[in-house]
């Protein structure tokens, strides 16, 4: 599908806002990119490709910020990514039928919206310091499961991982945000590799450049916003409502052809 110049400009504005919001808390915004693209009936191959590229552009800045501030500890993050990276590649390598893809996408968007609301309502700051220790196999299982689903639909998976880790009291909020950012980065790169491997990468150059510049700018703005000064909880709820509505629409219209 070839979008008009007006549609591309509209997408750039929305992607910029999403990148600012998610980049400020270490996320890439993949689920929201997919939600917006679904509204415009963009090819599902293009949706996954653009979402993964935009994810990478945004979280590169976030990951660098966490490394610079000393919150990045690869030894703690390794158990999650060692299983998520190959599973994200495997998930992205699947050549799904369009209807199956939209069923999975609709379900993932709805779950992502619920997780996002739950996280916004319960963990709006970085003051939570009580942590618990868990066996390594739990980290491996979480990484593998989230990585596989993320690869299939074209997101990094941080929107699922972070709320689960908050619930488990795995670490401080800053540490979880740092892990989520790195998790999204490596899984998005792996998922992108899976798309190239399966020859399903499809991103029009004009859209790729325009949206890439939009999220690059938005992500850098978000990274530079102080975590203490910015309270994104309200924006997360609004975004989650949008994602939920579009997820339901994707299921009913794109997947089930009910409406």
Image (cartoon, rainbow, N blue to C red):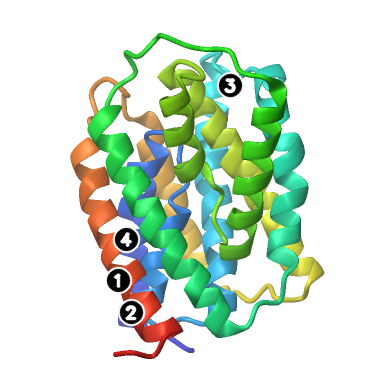
Picture disc at residue 67 = 3
Distance from the alpha carbon under mark 1 to that under mark 4: 17 Å
Tell me which numbered mark, 1 or 4, is placed earlier along the sequence. 1
Give the crowd class for mark 4: few <14, some 14-19, many >=20 residues within 10 Å. Answer: many
Residue at which label 4 appears: 243
Distance from the alpha carbon under mark 2 to that under mark 1: 5 Å
Q: How many numbered dots are placed on residues in this image?
A: 4
Distance from the alpha carbon under mark 4 to that under mark 3: 30 Å
Residue at which label 2 appears: 7
Residue at which label 1 appears: 10
Tell me which numbered mark, 2 or 4, is placed earlier along the sequence. 2
Q: Which SS class for mark 1?
A: helix
Q: Where is residue 204 in the image (x, y as percent from the top left)?
A: 57, 78
Distance from the alpha carbon under mark 2 to that under mark 4: 19 Å
Task: Find residue 152 and report its image quarter.
Answer: bottom right
- In-image side of 243 versus 94 (left or right): left
Q: Which SS class for mark 2?
A: helix
Give the crowd class for mark 1: few <14, some 14-19, many >=20 residues within 10 Å. Answer: few
Task: Find residue 81 and report its image quarter.
Answer: top right
- In-image side of 212 versus 80 (left or right): left
Q: Where is residue 34 in the image (x, y as percent from the top left)?
A: 44, 65
Does residue 97 appear anywhere in the picture? yes
Residue 231 vertical position relative to residue 27 in the rendered view, above or below? above
Distance from the alpha carbon under mark 2 to that under mark 3: 36 Å
CB atoms of marks 1 and 3 within 8 Å: no
């Amino acid at each position: 599908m070839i979008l008009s110049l007006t549609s591309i400009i509209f997408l750039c504005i929305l992607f910029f806002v999403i990148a600012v919001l998610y980049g400020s808390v270490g996320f890439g915004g993949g689920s929201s990119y997919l939600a917006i693209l679904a509204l415009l009936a963009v090819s599902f191959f293009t949706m996954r490709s653009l979402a993964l590229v935009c994810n990478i552009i945004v979280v590169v800045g976030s990951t660098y910020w966490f490394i610079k501030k000393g919150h990045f500890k690869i030894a703690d993050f390794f158990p999650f990514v060692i299983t998520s990276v190959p599973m994200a590649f495997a998930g992205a390598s699947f050549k799904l039928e369009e209807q199956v893809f939209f069923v999975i996408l609709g379900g993932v968007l709805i779950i992502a919206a619920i997780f996002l609301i739950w996280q916004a309502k319960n963990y709006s700051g970085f003051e939570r310091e009580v942590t618990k220790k868990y066996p390594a196999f739990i980290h491996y299982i979480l990484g593998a499961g989230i990585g596989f689903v993320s690869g299939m639909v074209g997101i990094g998976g941080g929107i699922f991982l972070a709320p689960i880790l908050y619930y488990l009291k795995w670490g401080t909020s800053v540490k979880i945000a740092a892990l989520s950012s790195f998790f999204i980065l490596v899984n998005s790169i792996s998922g992108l590799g899976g798309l190239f491997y399966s020859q399903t990468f499809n991103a029009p150059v004009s859209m790729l450049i325009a949206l890439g510049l939009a999220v690059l700018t938005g992500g850098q703005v978000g990274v530079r916003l102080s975590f203490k000064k910015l309270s994104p909880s309200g924006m997360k709820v609004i975004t989650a409502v949008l994602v939920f509505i579009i997820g339901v629409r994707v299921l009913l219209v794109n997947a089930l052809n009910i409406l």
